[in-house]
Amino acid sequence: MGRVLGLAIWIITLGSVWMFASKHWWFPESISEHGPLVDHQFAITIIVCGIAFAAAQIGLGWVVWKYRDSSAATRATYSHGNNRLEVVWTVVTAVVFISLAIMGQRVWASLHLHAAPAGSYTVEVVAQQFSWNFHYHGKDNVFGRTDPNLIDDSALNYVGLDDTDPNAKDDSVVSTLVVPVNRPVELILKSKDVTHSFFVPQLRFKQDLVPGMAIPVHFTVNKVGKYELACAELCGMNHYKMKSYMLVLPENEFSELVNLSQEKFQARKDELLAKYQLPQY
Amino acid sequence: MAEAIHEEVHRHPAPTGFIRKYIFSIDHKVIGIQYILLALTAVVVGLVMSVLMRLNLSWPGTNWPIMGTLFPTGAPGGIMSPEFYLSLVTMHGTIMVFFVLTTAPQGGFGNYFLPIQIGADDMAFPFLNMMSFWVTFVGFVVLLLAIFAEGNLTIGSWFSKLGESFAAGSGTVGPIGGWTGYAPLSALGKIAGPGQGAGVNLWIISIAIFCVGSLLGALNFITTLLNMRTRGMTLMRMPLTCWAWFTTAVLALLSFPVLLGGGILLLLDRVAGTSFFIPGGLYVSGSLVPLHNGGSPLLWQHLFWFFGHPEVYIAILPGMGATSHILSTFARKPIFGYRAMVFAIFAIGMLGFFVWGHHMFISGMSPYSAVAFSVLTLSIGVPSAIKTFNWLGTLWGAKIRFTTPMLFAIGFVSLFVAGGITGLVLGQTSLDFFFHDTYFVTAHFHLVMGVASIFGMFAATYFWFPKMFGRMMSESLGKFHFWVTFIGVYAIFVPFHAMGMVGMPRRYAQFGEYEFLKNTHGLVLFVTVAAIITAVVQLVFYFNFFWSMFKGKKAGDNPWEATTLEWNIPSPPPHDNFAGIVPEVYRGPYEFAVPGAAKDYIMQSEPEGGPVGAH
């Protein structure tokens, strides 16, 4: 039984390590400036995990193989442990784990512990049960006033934009996120009803949208294209299809689009949405 | 002095009537078995739900006629609706976490064996012990009602009389907020969609009741362990199982009150118009939510996870204790580094209170707090690694007897490593950008707190069954059960990591909406097949359990040649455990292979004088 169990543990270990090492199921290609750093940190972490995992499992397989009850040996070794060994492995794991923990803060800190860089383009994101609204400030660079009391989904005023505010005149609200390539983007994340989460796998970015809060986040996208945007926090029955797209445009196409008035913005955005293709999966 | 009190207060005569003996019993052994039976019942419900979830994920939109008959509103025409799927997600999680992983390991085996292993004749407060089980049982019944209050119009109508927020029959089988019940989805009531009515109220009430039961139990465990150890049973001579149950009880005592408080506040938000978790200016399902202002959704998450993280240790620590105990017994070798094991278990328990924020990195919490929580989280890996090293050290130079309990204990070590190691990935803020709420997380916690804990309980069941029922479980059925389950759980949960790698989100009723998920269909199908096979094989365990109770080979007092006090007394033990004789302990719990001893084990109760081991 010991040999079979040892073998079984080794085969499972091999299979699990292969699943990662083959990279058959892997991250989609990164499209953000910080993405490769996330991928790199993951690579380091998964190698450390892989080594620790394989060492422990191979060791476990080895001891059950080697120390199975064969009648030759009369008794097990009488030992209550070894303090020196305890100290060694405690110190080694502490150093490795804490180092990983500290390295694992770098990308996070670069995005979250700094304000959006100057020159960022700001979009307000307002999530609601099973759809996304993206509020653009238009030419004047100022968002029109919004008020929850003015929200009226049936009149298509999804974010409660105040039409009487002069700053609101050139604002647009659309259901697709359009951002410029190679320029920092700042999103102000809000929710009308329950907690949602903004997730674009290629972006290596996820952040909850919490009712009652306006959460500013920022990142820079460096690849033009069309990408799926998913909700990643359970928000009700149609959570699984609360989907939109993130459209990443060259600067000229982008600035042309966002300076259009609401109707033209909408129409042009739909054209562009059809023009760009999703990545090959 | 302490002993005089304990003899006077705690000895109660053996009951004679059926009801006092088997139903409202104050005997810790009967209560322990009641907890185990409750868990064995609950786990069937939870397991069937997981199979239904797999069916829906693999073949969405398929007509399952039987589902249409059982749940005419949740699965109209036999096709499972997305909200039906989410209610399965919610109830599967709630049932498994609370009524399986918290009841069997602690209330079940802890109740039965903690008093015996420390040489006591019962728990410190036998009546309280009975109360804690029956309170928990009521919690379970209320949870089952939560399913039917939403899904069954007749039962729903009973609750509708309690007021608007209980108006039910929304057409699903239960609440659909996930086991974490994030507010404000869980706080708004029916306007937030189907599955947010009476079912959620009953779900909260059930958990609140459960908290009370667990608190009563925790008080009892702590008092018993500190006050009722027999002569010679110093703290450092206790079996590691007792250390695990004790630490678990401390965690329960400190964490359940927080969930209880949070649950009450959530219920008040729903039924009494308060706004603890509901901010102002919400616009839900086409209308503005009046009368709510100033609440914080993040407050719920902090309260929930302040409990929720210690809860995962509540689930797994008893499994660690049982594994340590069983590994040493069948390795025929003392546990490696007893002191280090005790410190590690306590370190895990205490550190467990300072890491809840790692569930909330992307929740909108301060990113500075996230950094602190992240570093503390990876620190928990250190005592966890110490335990793993010590388990391997215990097996090194052993003379292993591959009994079924031993196989499951070895399986526990393997699964604990496999599940625990990915904590290094998920604990890093920068990687959480991608992995939060993907199947990578589902893989991690199912392996480590789900199946590793369950393997600990299987090991405990096969190990202590002869003591509890006086008969052995079938070894060949047990081994068959082990092999299929061990390979099966890996086949189910390793592919979950691959799904996580491509970014598959949790709690999706279907994956077909997204192009980036289209290459995962083969994986999803593979997992479903593995899950069905593994689930069906659990029937072998059930058969073995109940068949062996009556037909198993008779077990002697000490069939495993083990050392701790429960193996000194008859199987099953008499009503007051030690038949009125106060046992005395002379040595540590794991004296195997002592050089010069007559046998390869020396029991804790064996008096000084002969060849001895460490004290």
Image (cartoon, rainbow, N blue to C red):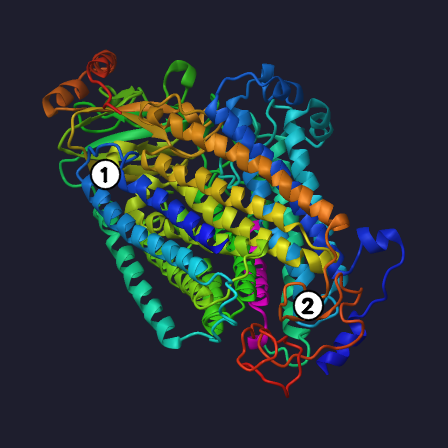
Q: Position of residue B400 (x, y in %)?
A: 51, 62
Q: Nearer the viewer, residue A164 or B281?
A: B281
Judged left or right of residue A277, residue B254 is right
Q: Is residue B203 visible?
A: no
Q: Is residue A116 above or below residue A86?
A: above
B525 in magenta: no
What residue lies at 25% left-to-right and 30% top-to-bottom?
Answer: A123
Circle 1 is placed at which residue position?
A218
Q: Which residues are magenta?
A: B235-259
Task: Specify the amino acid type for callout 1.
Answer: His
Mark number displayed over residue B564 = none
Q: Position of residue A206 (x, y in %)?
A: 32, 37
Q: Nearer the viewer, residue B340 or B590?
A: B590
Residue at disc 2, secondary structure: helix
Q: Is residue A263 above or below residue A147?
A: above
Q: Is residue B68 above or below residue B360?
A: above
Q: Nearer the viewer, residue B109 or B201?
A: B109
Task: Specify the amino acid type for callout 2.
Answer: Trp
Mark 1 chain: A
Mark number displayed over residue B567 = 2
Q: Is residue B413 visible?
A: yes
Q: Position of residue A55 (x, y in %)?
A: 34, 56
What residue lies at 42% left-to-right and 61% top-to-bottom?
Answer: A66
**Structural crowding at the residue carrying mark 2, measured as other residues with C-alpha within 10 Å and reported as few (<14), some (14–19) or many (≥20):** many
Judged left or right of residue A139, residue B552 is right
Q: Position of residue B256 (x, y in %)?
A: 58, 54
- Rounded to the nearest angstrom, the CA distance separating label 1 from label 2 is 63 Å
B244 in magenta: yes
In which quarter of the view is residue A134 placed?
top left
Which residue extends farthest right? B17
